[in-house]
Image (tube, rainbow, N blue to C red):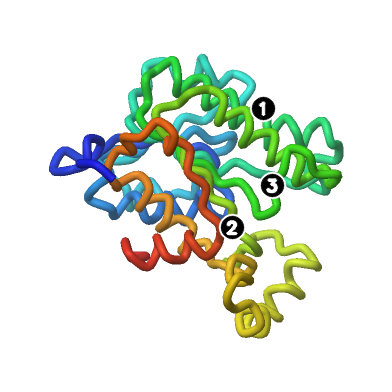
Amino acid sequence: MGKRDNGGSKGYRALLVGATGLVGSELLRQLLTDAECIQVTVLARRPLADDAAVVGQGKLRVITADFDQMERALAGVEAEVIFCAIGTTIKKVKTQEAFRRVDYDYPVMLGEWALRKGVKKMIVVSAMGADASSRIFYSRVKGEMEQQLSRLGLPELHVLRPSLLLGNRTELRTGERIATLLSPLLSMLTVGPLRKYRPIHDKQVAAAMRAAAAEGQLLNKRDRVRMYDSNEIAASAAVIGMR
């Protein structure tokens, strides 16, 4: 790691896309109280809860727009760090095409915008098991998204691959409810090389994203794409704290 060039005493300006989801909403809460982040611009498809604006005071700017109009919506926005926490489910959007639009097209569009704007870092939430060659549609789309973002040539790309996410979901699906109840047992059983499969809290993922934003610039071009499994996410979160 080198010296900070996006943080330090001046701090950084952030663009957050996906602030209404589990990880995104927690990340916004943390950024609003993080001295390293001096400004947060949120691009959202629907208005945020009123309390977010109150906590953020003058630090928060919210742009509500259709993501298909992303380029127009982000005109004039300046940021050193982009946080992407976009994600949906086929159950919610009904079709594979609509799922791919959200989980592949929008993150890639955001990465292309970042490249044109000279953004220093993009930090994106993917998923454990992401693999462009997977037979599982969900994992394949996530893997293709990672692959395409990696090919853009961004100065830095940080990809977080959490396992089962724990947190206060507004919509908890049956499988996730069962897995959440079993999470203490899963944590006990997943040791050694299996630690990356341990369930992880939304607060930890958000904190790890802040840690990636605050750390020094990656000077080696070969290391400009960095992947984090759940074990590495937890380690990063522990270093920066989850205030």
Sequence-earlier tag: 1 or 3: 1
Residues at circles 1 and 3 in contact by the CB criterion of under 8 Å: no
Residues at circles 2 and 3 in contact by the CB criterion of under 8 Å: no
Q: Which residue type does callout 2 highlight?
A: Pro
Q: Which of the two discs, 2 and 3, sits closer to the camera?
A: 3
What residue would you read off at disc 3? 130
Sequence-earlier tag: 1 or 2: 1
Residue 161, relative to residue 155: is it above or below? below
Question: Residues under labels 1 and 2: Cα distance?
Answer: 20 Å
What residue would you read off at disc 2? 162
Q: Which residue type does callout 1 highlight?
A: Asp
Residues packed near mark 2 inside 10 Å, few (<14), some (14 to 19) or many (20 plus) = many
The label number, if any, that marks residue 46 in the structure image: none
- Specify the quadrant that holds the C terminus: bottom left
Q: Secondary structure at mark 2?
A: loop
Q: Residue at x 35, y 50 (%)?
A: 31
**Looking at the image, how many numbered discs can be counted on the residues?**
3
Residues packed near mark 1 inside 10 Å, few (<14), some (14 to 19) or many (20 plus) = some
Horizontally, residue 83 falls left or right of residue 46, namely: left
- Tell me residue 167's x, y (percent): 57, 66
Q: Secondary structure at mark 3?
A: loop
- Tell me residue 94's x, y (percent): 85, 40
What residue would you read off at disc 1? 105
Horizontally, residue 123 falls left or right of residue 104, namely: left
Residues packed near mark 3 inside 10 Å, few (<14), some (14 to 19) or many (20 plus) = many
Q: Residue at x 75, y 33 (%)?
A: 100
Residue 155: quarter of image: top left
Q: Residue at x 25, y 36 (%)?
A: 6
Q: Which residue type does callout 3 highlight?
A: Ala
